[in-house]
Amino acid sequence: MSDFPSNQPAVPKVFAERLNEIANGGVFGISILVATVYAVAGFVQIIGGHMVDRFPMRTVYLVGFVLQIPFLMLAGVLSGTKLVVIAVIMVSVSIGSLPVENVLIAAYTPSHMRGFVFCCKFIFALGVGSLGVWLEGALFDFTGDFLWLWLFLILAGLAGLAGCMSLLLPSEGRQPAPAPAE
């Protein structure tokens, strides 16, 4: 699971705090910047889909998590235009890995359980997203400020942990044969 649900609530807030000079302190300007980040990232899913069609699924998934780590760490310390560029890359890598998650579920879940497993995936994603909001609030209560470095370092650590866990996925040699269309 990418860290997308956890960084999703953080991006607007970190933009509001660090991009006042770009957005002229307005909510509309921040909204346009956040929308741009997610619009670009949405198109990157197409690239993620092409990658999973051409390369081993486990490798694509692992690379997606590993690539998130430096960009999450950079997002914790940058501001201004650099932050926008890093946020585009960070969110793009995260969202770009979503197609491989879906292909992995489809490939390794028995056909009679796919609906249930996809449901569980999305419930889990919403739960993780809500933990991201809680984590932001807890960090603010603990420090009296939004120390974005800590939030993004925690998310980078979780991406590293998820990357390690992706190594537990079956190797491509044990990949099941594709099921015929139902």
Image (cartoon, rainbow, N blue to C red):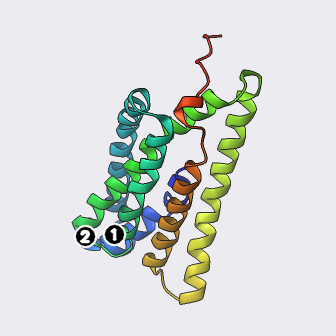
* Spot occupied by residue 94 in the image (x, y as percentages of width and height): 44, 50
* Spot occupied by residue 169 in the image (x, y as percentages of width and height): 60, 42
Instruction: Count neighbours of disc 1 (C-alpha within 10 A) and say few if under 14, some if 14 to 19, many if 20 or more.
Output: some
- 2 vs 1, front mark: 1
Asked if residue 161 lies left or right of residue 69, the reply is right
For the C terminus, the image quarter is top right
Disc 1, SS: helix
* Spot occupied by residue 49 in the image (x, y as percentages of width and height): 42, 31
Disc 2, SS: helix
**Badge 2 is on which residue?**
80
Dividing the picture into quadrants, the one containing residue 139 is bottom right
Q: Nearer the viewer, residue 120 or 109?
A: 109
Taking 151 as reference, is 63 above or below it? Answer: above
* Mark 2–mark 1 CB contact (< 8 Å): no
- In the image, which disc is placed on residue 42? none
Q: Residue at x 42, y 26 (%)?
A: 53
* Number of dots carrying numbers: 2
Instruction: Say which amino acid is labelled 1.
Output: Leu
Instruction: Say which amino acid is labelled 2.
Output: Gly
Taking 3 as reference, is 105 above or below it? Answer: above
**Badge 1 is on which residue?**
74
Q: Residue at x 35, y 35 (%)?
A: 47
- Quick one: label 2 or label 1, which is nearer the N terminus? 1
Taking 89 as reference, is 149 above or below it? Answer: below
Distance CA(mark 2)–CA(mark 1): 12 Å
Asked if residue 93 lies left or right of residue 1, the reply is left
Asked if residue 182 lies left or right of residue 14, the reply is right
Q: Residue at x 77, y 22 (%)?
A: 112
* Spot occupied by residue 128 in the image (x, y as percentages of width and height): 63, 57
Instruction: Count neighbours of disc 2 (C-alpha within 10 A) and say few if under 14, some if 14 to 19, many if 20 or more.
Output: some
Q: Residue at x 37, y 45 (%)?
A: 41
